[in-house]
Amino acid sequence: MSEYTITVIKNENPKSKPASDELKFGKYFTDHMFIQDYNMEKGWHNARIIPYQPVALDPAAMIFHYGQTVFEGLKAYRTKDNEIQLFRPNKNMERLNRSNDRICIPPIDEEFAIKAIKHLVKIDSDWIPAAEGTSLYIRPFIIATEPYLGVNPSATYQFIVILSPVGAYYESGINPVKIAVENNYVRAVKGGTGEAKTAGNYASSLKAQEVVAKEGYAQVLWLDGLEKKYIEEVGSMNVFFKIDGKVITPQLNGSILEGVTRNSVIEMLKHWDIPVVERKISMQEIYNAYESGKLEEAFGSGTAAVISPIGELAWGEKKIYINNGETGELSHKLYDTLTGIQYGKVEDPFGWIVKVSN
Amino acid sequence: MSEYTITVIKNENPKSKPASDELKFGKYFTDHMFIQDYNMEKGWHNARIIPYQPVALDPAAMIFHYGQTVFEGLKAYRTKDNEIQLFRPNKNMERLNRSNDRICIPPIDEEFAIKAIKHLVKIDSDWIPAAEGTSLYIRPFIIATEPYLGVNPSATYQFIVILSPVGAYYESGINPVKIAVENNYVRAVKGGTGEAKTAGNYASSLKAQEVVAKEGYAQVLWLDGLEKKYIEEVGSMNVFFKIDGKVITPQLNGSILEGVTRNSVIEMLKHWDIPVVERKISMQEIYNAYESGKLEEAFGSGTAAVISPIGELAWGEKKIYINNGETGELSHKLYDTLTGIQYGKVEDPFGWIVKVSN
């Protein structure tokens, strides 16, 4: 990797920080941001931390027209001992480069990026809230900036990292949600961009989300785009089912995002000697398990919620009620252990924690 | 519709214009742009024509993260009598609103938008080149601007129109291209965003295009995402085949973009009493037609090229040679008539032309 050189311009006019109880998700942003430029001659260059400020782009910049962009999401946590730590940032940077490959964006230097993220988090560490369940959300993203309307990969890019202090996902403790199985809209299909963390996947999901929200559901559960039979993801999370003592999650197939929390749940279950399999799983199988009383738990996994228990699944006219609408024992244990590791309350036997303060 | 009020701020420092023979596609931009803002309280408001300038957005603006954006493409043509005219701009604005609906963007006022486009084109009319085959490309687009990282429709948007003088698509006359049938990557699937003109569809196409370009093919031909059997589009154009005297184009199915040129070709063929059908058509059927000597012509249709004849189709190991690699008679007639109408050389029996100069 290249030597770590980075320019820092401090913000002389820091903003006032929102109170812990005012925090939402992704609404407030800190005083600084990271930017790095790319062009053909220099590759990635001019890494800098500068005051948080607007990005000014030519209106013909390709990001505005052809969506050539990828992003990541991870968090910095403040421990009780006032240490700042990240959770598996290397997994996010590996995935960012896999997304880059799919969207024809030049790869970033993963080690450099982690150093830059730590540097930025350290500079804005006063922004990391301390209240239970709060954290600092980190959003790295890359945008195509060339002012050109041809449908081609851009010749220039910006890699940007912004930080947002976020409130506890569960205001009154971990709580199951109602999910609607989506039968009309499709999130992604094999050969498409479903396994990349790229803007278009999210734009395409808005309509389905809008429809089910009107019917009182928190998220949609996406089925495969080919047969609309097999389970893929729930909202923007991966999904797990506990059936007859075994945990099942859809196997990666090219259209499912490879979640860092998903991977952590699988590793943890293995560590606990709880049977876990990655395989194709149909909605019919879930319904059959429910009818035979073997569907014990269901939950989503993702960076924002960590574990999001599912209390009800609506599949067309059919309704599936899970664990009496209460959070299951395993869901609870996974949530407590994962957040425990993230906040430094529980020992990390996996080597997942990366300290920011050194 | 609302009254037409628009603020105009003239560019006091106009750029020098590129020579006609230096023009490419989407590389140069004129001196002015149109912008209109949207928020929940005011709806679309503050329509203005201002000097061409960078768009400055918060780095958390949703366009950078979730791709909530739609666009259009149309052209202004300079006739021999020095009149400026548009080709079916109402079709583009209707499609823009259909795209808006799919991507959860509030609808624009179509009539107002056409007036604004005419106004902008008139102000920058000196930029419309006069040389054979040149024109002024018009790019209306809408971007989500709310600085918020939740995956929701944005609360604010900007509707922008920029103009780009473009060279002749065919530098030495209309000329057939070699196309590769895409068997790995998928552009769109039913239930996805294929029929919307939105950024994600284009980002997802870059990889396939990159692969075939290395093998000497100009574009990919997209098959359906479900069975990879049925023909959808070619590159970013619609596609037509002439088999045994009849013209066939894939029927609109939710994953195919409804091209304005596609519609114009169908209308024109009907006007000429040439049989034309919109239906499902498989690659196998095309191959069979080729083997039995009945595949007479194939061509793409789109705003940029108008008609783009296909001389060769590579379908895995199989090669299909069409009309000895030469432009077919019908392709030529369609190209000449459509461009003839666009440039005012041929009478327009359809009412497609909208004059800018009045």
Image: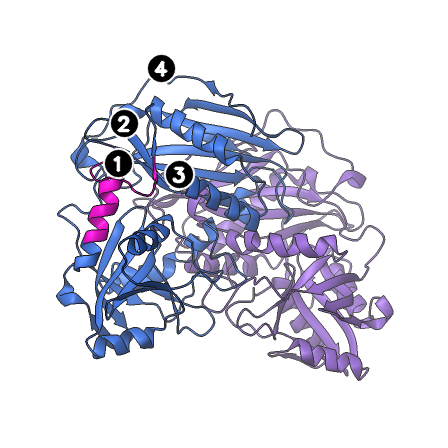
Chain colours: A purple, B blue
Chain under numbered label 3: B
Locate residue B180: give its quadrant.
bottom left
Which of the two discs, 2 and 3, sits closer to the camera?
A: 3
Locate residue A340: give its quadrant.
bottom right
- Whole-Å distance between the Cαs marked 4 and 2? 15 Å
Q: Position of residue B322 (x, y in %)?
A: 19, 67
Q: Hey, what amino acid is under mark 4?
A: Glu
- Whole-Å distance between the Cαs marked 2 and 3? 19 Å
- Whole-Å distance between the Cαs marked 3 and 4? 29 Å
Which of the two discs, 1 and 4, sits closer to the camera?
A: 1
Residue B102 seen in the current view: yes
Q: Is residue B51 left or right of residue A316?
A: left
Chain under numbered label 2: B
Considering depth in this image, is A125 or A246 the residue closer to the camera?
A246
Q: Position of residue B64 (x, y in %)?
A: 52, 44
Residue with the mark numbered 2: B127
Q: Earlier in the sequence, mark 1 or mark 2?
A: 2
**Magenta range:** B333-353
Check disc 1: other Cα within 10 Å, few if <14, some if 14-19, many if 20+: many
Q: Residue at x 67, y 30 (%)?
A: B41
Callout 3: helix, strand or loop?
helix
Residue with the mark numbered 1: B135
